[in-house]
Image (cartoon, grey):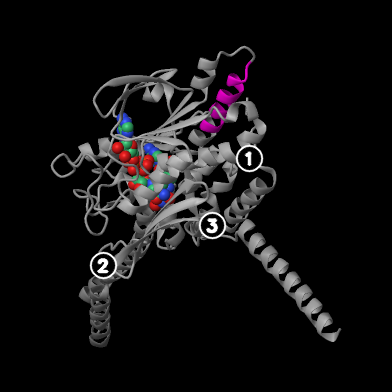
Amino acid sequence: QGFLQFVGKATLITTIGGVGALYYITQREKNPGPQLPFDPDKKTLVILGSGWGATSLLKNLDTADFNVVVVSPRNFFLFTPLLPSVAVGTLNNRSIIQSIRYITRHKARNVSVIEAEATDVDPVNKLIKFADNSEVRGAVSSTAIPYDYLVYAVGAETQTFNIPGVKEHACFMKELNDAERFQNEFIDCLETAGFPGQDPQEIERLLHMVVVGGGPTGVELSGELHDFLEDDLKSWYPELAGKVRITLVEALPSVLPTFSKQLIDYTQSTFKESKIEVLTKTMVKEIKERSVILQMPDKSIQEVPCGLVVWAGGNKGRKVTQDLMAKFPEVQTNRRGIVVDDFLRMTGAEDSIFAIGDCTSTAYAPTAQVASQQGSYLARHLHQMAKHDELQTKLSRLEALAATVVGEEEKKATLRDVEMTKKQLAKIKYRPFDYSHQGSLAYIGSEKAVADLPFMNGNVATGGVATYMFWRSAYLSTLFSLRNRTLVATDWIKVKLFGRDVAREQ
Ligand code: FAD
Ligand code: NAI
């Protein structure tokens, strides 16, 4: 009995301690303290974007070094790996976003956040022009600010290859509103298919979902869609669920072309079991309001009726990026994006513009992993630059003093300081960016995931339910904040208990 009392007390104390610690952490996060004001003696660092690259930079940046300004049309960070889960209602849209002010308000010095879209970079006069393109605009909605250093992290937009009808009729899967639009239109297709008197052919069309692009985005969305169908739609739309078809169209010979052969085969066989039709070596040539035009492997053309098309055809540079690159016509000629050197400096603008993430063209794939490692590297690099600038200013001041000072002893002391400062300056060594690949993971539905993991100098390819658990825990731990982790974990539990929500927003 004594032992039970001891266990009871220990449990009570641990619970109270845990709740207290949680309360303390959340309150500290909710109520950031005062910040240093802008310092006119510091250089201005402008960061464009609030995605993976920019946020990782901001998290790691010592804002005491600069006056920092963030300009982005999105005032939040979006955890893209879980976007397909939002598209099918496994996760709530708010669970995978976090306001950018959540980081900036916790920094040592005040960081200015401007919700606007950069429209032009003038590298000669070091000016950024930007405009508020949101729905609500004030009397002033465009302006320009100067920068000393610019971190260019605007990401990329969806590549459509100018294929007719893509922009007009397909859903993308890149931004939060794409996932929301998909969710709404998908449920609309189901409800419309259930309209009295709908003929069987039209029902078949409305319930045919076509996903274009067998890269990780298209594969993950197809897998999530299949889960939605199996776990929930069969209960809520019993008369229709069996008629829903998912077709994944890929121009190349296989899906997930960057994964190992074993994982490609595993994915394709899982999709076969899940009745997801995979059409490889098949190219979408046009998207119409009610169909897709496909070029089949034998080059024949087929028109396939469908209710909804999701376009996941890859990335392309934004217009503002293309315009910036055009200002360096001799060196910025790579169509994939901005060329940077080993220190992530934009070639041609070495002293003032850094570029990271999907807007660049590097040896690495355009992934969150690369962008966030580049962001944290740049935070260290900029800290060293600030230290260098500070020492350089000190050195100039000391050298000027040494030239004017008259007393023998005073001159000697100043020259000693000059030498010491020079030594400190010489100690600053800039290391190049070095990417460390942590592996690739993709969810393929039916509680299975595939992972290419670097291990013992080789690649371990693994798939299956254990990998799925690893996928969930890996994403849970990389989520932005305690708030996001709590919301996502709660959403997963809610879906297990109550299923996904099939209510449609009007
Ligand atoms: P982004 O994260 O796209 O951020 C760009 C930022 O710039 C945004 O805040 C945007 O609003 C802002 N911006 C846009 N235009 C302007 C402008 N004119 N001026 C100022 N700011 C601007 N990668 C992985 O490694 N693992 C995954 O599991 C994974 N899953 C993914 C799932 C999906 C559905 C998608 C679409 C991508 C996924 N990726 C994944 C890729 C990953 O999201 C990108 O590589 C990553 O977002 C690139 O980071 P970034 O900072 O370059 O760009
Ligand atoms: P992607 O570029 O990887 O794949 C796009 C696919 O669409 C290509 O395979 C291409 O052949 C195909 N395609 C293009 N046009 C076509 C057409 N007309 N008809 C048929 N097929 C066509 O793009 P995705 O999947 O959006 O990924 C973008 C980046 O984000 C990649 O670097 C990827 O690695 C990363 N990402 C990583 C994820 C992960 O690691 N789990 C998840 C999602 C994205």
Say whether residue 146 is visible.
Answer: no
Numbered label attached to residue 430? 2
Q: Which one is earlier in the sequence, the residue at label 3 or at label 1?
A: 3
Instruction: Give the secondary structure at mark 3.
Output: helix
- Residue stretch in magenta: 182-195
Q: Which one is earlier in the sequence, the residue at label 3 or at label 2?
A: 2
The image quadrant of residue 425 is bottom left
* Viewer-nearest of discs 1 and 2: 1
Q: Is mark 3 within 8 Å of ligand 1?
A: no
* Viewer-nearest of discs 3 and 1: 1
Q: Position of residue 402 (x, y in %)?
A: 23, 76
Q: Which one is earlier in the sequence, the residue at label 1 or at label 2?
A: 2
Residue on which disc 3 sits: 476
* Viewer-nearest of discs 3 and 2: 3
The reply to whether the C-beta atoms of the residues labelled 3 and 2 are less than 8 Å apart is no
Given residues 115 and 112, the one toward you in this image is 115
Given residues 342 and 401, the one toward you in this image is 342
Q: Look at label 3 and name its amino acid.
A: Leu
Q: Look at label 2 and name its amino acid.
A: Tyr
Residue on which disc 1 sits: 500
Numbered label attached to residue 156? none
Ligand 1 image-quadrant field? top left
